[in-house]
Image (cartoon, rainbow, N blue to C red):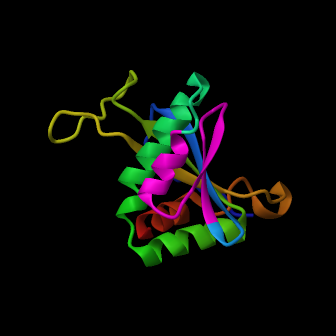
Amino acid sequence: WRAYAFFLTKENGEMCRVSFFNHNGMPYLVVASKNVTLAAAATSLETIRTDLRSYSEERYMFAQEMAEAFATRFFDKLREDQRVELINYVCENQATLCGESISPLHQHIQSYRGETGEIQPQIRFFAITAPLPFDSSGLTLLDPEKALHQFQSW
């Protein structure tokens, strides 16, 4: 084993987890807040939004906000080949993308104001995990630096 330090900025959002699965040939997006998970068909931004509307209970509020931010600010901006690559990578590795959800609807200690002075909803990803044994794989699927490069490639 080789140990090294890789420093990232400490974010101050809500914990967000994103994954995908395929069912009957259709990709599904899975988004989880700290306590609640939801799923939506990931064939287009409109199908994601349609499925998100079916989660009407208040307890889904954070997960819905996160799914909307992921869908509009990340997933919908990818080219089709990048979306396919992302979905395939996550599904093949049973991976979870871990990040912090930044929202203008909630208070943050750290300032996330952009050039216009407004806070844009976003998810800042910092790790990719998978259900692998710690003794052979470590804490994450990819080293943090490699994960950062992977997120940037999508």
Magenta stretch: includes residue 88: no
Question: Considering depth in this image, is 112 or 79 the residue closer to the camera?
Answer: 79
For image coordinates 43% across by 74% down, the residue present is: 80
Question: Image quarter for residue 130?
Answer: bottom right
Question: Considering depth in this image, is 153 or 81 the residue closer to the camera?
Answer: 81
For image coordinates 62% across by 55% down, the residue present is: 19
Question: Considering depth in this image, is 27 or 136 the residue closer to the camera?
Answer: 27
- If the image is split into quadrants, where does the C terminus sit? bottom left
Residue 103 visible in the picture: yes
Residue 5 visible in the picture: no
Residue 42: x percent and y percent? Answer: 54, 60
Magenta stretch: includes residue 29: yes
Range shown magenta: 27-53
Residue 73: x percent and y percent? Answer: 36, 52
In the displayed structure, 21 sits above or below 31; it is below
Residue 57: x percent and y percent? Answer: 59, 26
